[in-house]
Image: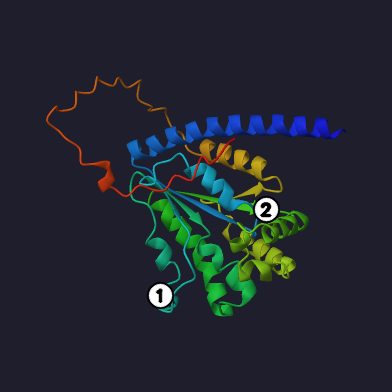
């Protein structure tokens, strides 16, 4: 295959991807309005390996939505005080009220993954999490919360490729946290932790849905399409809005001199000659 053919195919794929993504984002807006109208409470959990593409998918879901209705929660490491609380307490504070959807970028499953592998919790704490997590989630579902759980799966080879890409790109190096670097050394340990976690928490009331994310764009389209399929919603999009003619500006109104204001220096566009 020639370079020209490869470039042409890539261009066609990207065009198809952008077109489909735009349509899905329109559907997400419809879903958002339905959630608000019906007073639904939705929680979507995004978990998976480091560099699996969770953040990119979340960004595409939320970029056209109202942050007052659809919010993203990405909690930092617990404080010393939070470490003494009931484990689920700090997550429960971010659960949605009626008419809201909350996306958890990492969740209470930190205990089943990174905390387990890195030794940040005791064996007793880990075992208690495995016992109580399914009951906690069943309680959420009984309370009327729609709980959706996604696991982004990426191969060892693709993850390493993305790590190298982050290392080479100054705008992405911040993504290589100490935990990310350590995870490179513990692929098998994380695999075992994930398998054990699934065995205990893949419950009927809140099953895990696995997203193959070796191709990020495929993963985004597949995940968003699946999310939309899980909630029956109707199109509440209002009809075309007619804008009345604007009233004239008052003749007696005099604006202050522009010289009194601090304008941002215009550096773009620069010299285009």
Question: Label for residue 242?
Answer: none
Question: Which x, y percent locates residue 56?
Answer: 58, 48
Quarter of the C terminus within the rendering:
top right
Where residue 71 sits: x, y (%)? 42, 50
- Disc 1: which residue: 85
Task: Find numbered disc 1 in the image and state the secondary structure of the residue it sits on.
Answer: loop
Left/right of residue 201 with respect to residue 101 in the rendered view = right
- Label count reads 2
Give how far apart the Cα atoms at labels 2 and 1 are. 31 Å
Horizontal side of 252 relative to 105 (left or right) equals: left
Kindly state the secondary structure of the residue where label 2 is placed: strand
Query: How many neighbours does mark 2 have within 10 angstroms: few (below 14), some (14-19), or many (20 or more)?
Result: many
What residue is rendered at 44% in x and 44% in y? 266
What residue is at 54 percent from the left and 30 percent from the top?
23
Q: Is residue 39 visible?
A: yes
Instruction: From the image, state whether disc 2 or disc 1 is nearer to you.
Output: 2
Image coords of residue 139 (percent x, y)? 42, 57
Task: Indicate whether 111 appears above or below 236.
Answer: below
**255 displayed left or right of 30:** left
* Residue where numbered disc 2 is placed: 153
């Amino acid at each position: 295959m020639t370079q020209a053919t490869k470039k042409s195919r890539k261009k066609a794929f990207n065009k198809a991807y952008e077109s489909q993504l735009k349509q899905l984002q329109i559907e997400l807006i419809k879903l958002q309005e339905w959630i608000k109208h019906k007073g639904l409470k939705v929680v979507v959990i995004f978990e998976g390996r480091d560099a699996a593409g969770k953040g990119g998918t979340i960004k595409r879901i939320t970029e056209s939505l109202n942050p007052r209705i659809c919010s993203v929660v990405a909690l930092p490491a617990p404080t010393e005080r939070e470490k003494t609380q009931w484990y689920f307490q700090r997550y429960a504070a971010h659960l949605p009220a009626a008419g809201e959807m909350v996306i958890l970028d990492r969740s209470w499953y930190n205990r089943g993954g990174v905390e387990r592998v890195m030794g940040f919790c005791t064996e007793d704490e880990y075992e208690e999490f495995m016992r109580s997590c399914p009951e906690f989630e069943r309680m959420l579902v009984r309370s009327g919360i729609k709980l959706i759980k996604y696991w982004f799966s990426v191969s060892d080879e693709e993850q390493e490729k993305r790590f190298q890409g982050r290392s080479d790109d100054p705008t992405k190096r911040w993504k290589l946290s100490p935990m990310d670097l350590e995870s490179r050394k513990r692929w098998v340990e994380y695999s075992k932790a994930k398998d054990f976690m699934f065995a205990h928490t893949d419950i009927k009331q809140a099953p895990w849905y696995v997203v193959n994310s070796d191709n990020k764009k495929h993963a985004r389209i597949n995940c968003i399409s699946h999310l939309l399929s899980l909630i029956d919603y109707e199109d509440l999009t209002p009809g075309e809005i007619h804008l009345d003619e604007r009233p004239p500006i008052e003749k007696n109104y005099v604006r202050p001199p522009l010289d009194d204001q601090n304008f941002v220096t215009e550096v773009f566009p620069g010299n285009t000659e």
